[in-house]
């Protein structure tokens, strides 16, 4: 089957959104970024501003000098992320396989939709789909997009760069070598400034020069030479990357003035680390630890804090989680202390570190909640982000079962594993799990950009729920769906054997999250800090107006909802709304991506 690849590139995305939302900016040079009176850089520039040489990552003061009449607009990243969800949903609606590269850019593989053996005939058959996608984006989002079409990612990206804005370029297989010849070598994937300089010094300036070069390119650019030669002739076999592995997480802050004030720098680093690391929950790596942060509560402080909380509320259960809690050496002893207080103890773990020596130190009655994403070893490892995670989990769970510990299976459903639910639950039962926690993916600021390849479609969710219903009915195992699936997304009534939960929003049955340093958060999905339990009482924190205000918002889309579950649902996951949209008054981005 011939390959058909689109490269979708939104035109001056941030600036175009601002011009759409503010008609007075249309036709004017718009520069999204910090104002020139402050330190900062340009995030994006409209095409009117680009004519003056303004481009992204340029210092704002330089942009102002090049374009004196430029209109500076502060970026609204949450708004751009939400807009991106709508764009990627339109892209997915074509039936294509989508690899989202950024908020405004994606590759689409339409090979299965255009099943023609002749390569160029397949590409030509895709043109109506490209025009239709461009028109849908224009009519529904009032934005323009450029699409490049080719038989591989390399050529599709070059095609989209060829004619902007609002362009549509197709590079056929028959014409690709001729099309590439006049382009500068910098146009090829993987050629940066250093490689370009090395090639130019050898007299290789265009792709045509690369095609004609008879020597071994490895002498100029090392091992990349072999791949570069293939690229020069338009050959690129890279598949779309559909995994959600996260290679790195970062944060940044631009100060208005240079500073060497250590107090200011420490406060900034602490805030960034808190913002970033709260989202590392499911991305454990062995080489992270064991680490006990300097500010972390000691074993004795944890027990004292729990006793303090119990004076204010009838606490019944404590779950120990956060990345991989077993990286903390004294976790079994902490669990022993909590069990001695008459509390139920749950350890949320990937199970790989459940050795016999560790298990021997845990008190009887502890419940280990272990994650299984699939019965497919490779798929589980990819989602877990750790090679060998599957068999490590199996071995750890089996050791816990032999010691008669209670076990529960946790399975998070995404677009990657929705098809595997029934067999995964069967494996959990075989491993002696007494219950299943079945949850859909919950988006965060970090994963929102990948919503298009993580959030299952409504039909995929229906498929997964039907499989869970079948397993619960057939095997009599309790299956709880605790992350809300609003009734406007799916009718939940057919799934009579599943137990659907709703966020208690601080009410009866609410669960709060305590960070390792004693800070109280609304739940494990939220990075918001409600108070400090080391210096404040639990009741004092949860009853004050600031906390009540956190739970109060109802999205505008839900105010006229007549469904009987409206007051339970209230728009889905409130924490996700805050994390991804910056406001609890916005609907859960999971819901938005399903519409």
Image (spheres, helix red, strand yellow):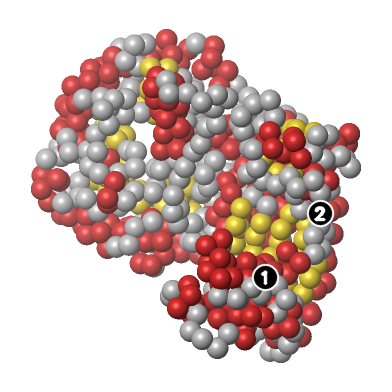
Q: Is residue 139 left or right of residue 361?
A: right
Residue plotted at (34% across, 42% down): 323
Front position in the image: 359 or 514: 514
- The x, y position of residue 526, in whole percent, is 48, 32
Q: Is residue 300 above or below residue 491?
A: above
Residue plotted at (27% across, 57% down): 393
Front position in the image: 24 or 512: 24
Mark 2 crowdedness (10 Å alpha carbons): few <14, some 14-19, many ≥20 = many
- The x, y position of residue 241, in whole percent, is 53, 65
Residue under label 1, please give it: 184
Mark 1 crowdedness (10 Å alpha carbons): few <14, some 14-19, many ≥20 = some
Q: Is residue 232 visible?
A: no
Q: Earlier in the sequence, mark 1 or mark 2?
A: 2
In this rendering, which labeled residue sits more in front, label 1 or label 2?
A: 1
Residue under label 2, please give it: 144
Which quarter of the picture shows residue 475?
A: bottom left
Q: Quadrant of the N terminus?
A: bottom right
Front position in the image: 64 or 322: 64
Q: Is residue 155 left or right of residue 407?
A: right
Residue plotted at (79% across, 70% down): 169
Q: Is residue 312 above or below residue 324?
A: above
Residue plotted at (45% across, 56% down): 245
Q: Is residue 291 visible?
A: yes
Question: SS class of the residue under badge 1?
Answer: loop
């Amino acid at each position: 089957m011939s390959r058909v690849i689109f490269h979708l590139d939104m035109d001056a995305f941030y600036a175009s959104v601002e011009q759409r939302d503010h008609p007075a900016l249309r036709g004017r040079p718009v520069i999204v970024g910090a104002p020139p009176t402050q330190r900062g850089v340009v995030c994006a520039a409209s095409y009117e501003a680009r004519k003056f040489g303004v481009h992204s990552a340029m210092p704002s003061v330089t942009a102002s000098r090049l374009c004196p009449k430029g209109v500076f607009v502060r970026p609204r990243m949450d708004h751009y992320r939400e807009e991106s969800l709508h764009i990627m949903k339109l892209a997915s609606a074509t039936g294509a396989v989508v690899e989202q590269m950024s908020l405004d850019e994606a590759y689409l593989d339409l090979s299965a939709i255009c099943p023609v053996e002749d390569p160029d005939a397949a590409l030509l058959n895709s043109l109506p789909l490209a025009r239709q996608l461009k028109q849908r984006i224009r009519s529904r989002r009032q934005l323009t997009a450029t699409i490049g079409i080719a038989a591989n990612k390399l050529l599709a990206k070059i095609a989209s760069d060829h004619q902007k804005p609002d362009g549509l370029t197709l590079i056929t297989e028959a014409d690709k070598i001729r099309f590439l010849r006049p382009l500068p070598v910098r146009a090829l994937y993987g050629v940066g400034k250093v490689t370009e300089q090395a090639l130019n010094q050898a007299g290789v300036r265009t792709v045509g020069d690369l095609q004609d070069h008879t020597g071994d390119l490895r002498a100029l650019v090392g091992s990349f030479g072999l791949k570069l030669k293939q690229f020069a002739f338009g050959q690129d076999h890279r598949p779309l990357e559909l995994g959600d592995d996260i290679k790195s997480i970062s944060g940044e802050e631009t100060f208005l003035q240079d500073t060497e004030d250590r107090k200011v720098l420490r406060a900034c680093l602490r805030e960034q680390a808190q913002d970033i690391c709260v989202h590392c929950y499911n991305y454990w790596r062995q080489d992270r630890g064991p680490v006990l942060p300097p500010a972390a509560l000691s074993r004795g402080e944890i027990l004292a804090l729990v006793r303090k909380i119990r004076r204010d509320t009838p606490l019944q259960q404590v779950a120990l989680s956060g990345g991989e809690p077993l990286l903390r050496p004294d976790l079994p002893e902490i669990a022993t202390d909590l069990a001695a207080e008459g509390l139920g103890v749950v350890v949320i773990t990937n199970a790989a570190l459940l050795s016999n020596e560790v298990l021997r130190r845990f008190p009887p009655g502890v419940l280990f909640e272990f994650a299984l994403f699939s019965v497919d070893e490779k798929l589980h490892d990819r989602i877990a982000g750790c090679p060998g995670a599957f068999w490590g989990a199996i071995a750890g769970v089996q050791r816990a079962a032999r010691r008669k510990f209670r076990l529960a299976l946790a399975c998070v459903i995404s677009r990657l594993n929705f098809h595997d639910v029934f067999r995964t639950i069967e494996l959990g039962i075989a491993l002696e799990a007494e219950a299943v926690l079945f949850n859909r993916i919950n988006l965060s600021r970090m994963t929102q950009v990948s919503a298009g390849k993580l959030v299952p479609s409504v039909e995929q969710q229906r498929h997964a729920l039907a499989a869970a219903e079948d397993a619960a009915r057939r095997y009599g195992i309790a299956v709880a769906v605790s992350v809300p699936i609003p009734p406007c997304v799916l009718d939940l009534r057919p799934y009579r054997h599943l137990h659907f939960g709703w966020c208690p929003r601080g009410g009866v049955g609410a669960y709060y999250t305590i960070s390792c340093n004693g800070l109280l958060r609304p739940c494990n999905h939220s990075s918001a800090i409600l108070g400090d339990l080391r210096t404040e009482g639990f009741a004092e924190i949860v009853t004050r107006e600031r906390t009540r205000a956190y739970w109060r918002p109802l999205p505008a889309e839900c105010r006229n909802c007549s469904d009987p579950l409206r007051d339970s649902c209230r728009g889905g996951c409130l924490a996700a709304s805050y994390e991804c949209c910056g406001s609890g008054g916005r609907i859960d981005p999971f819901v938005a991506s399903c519409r």
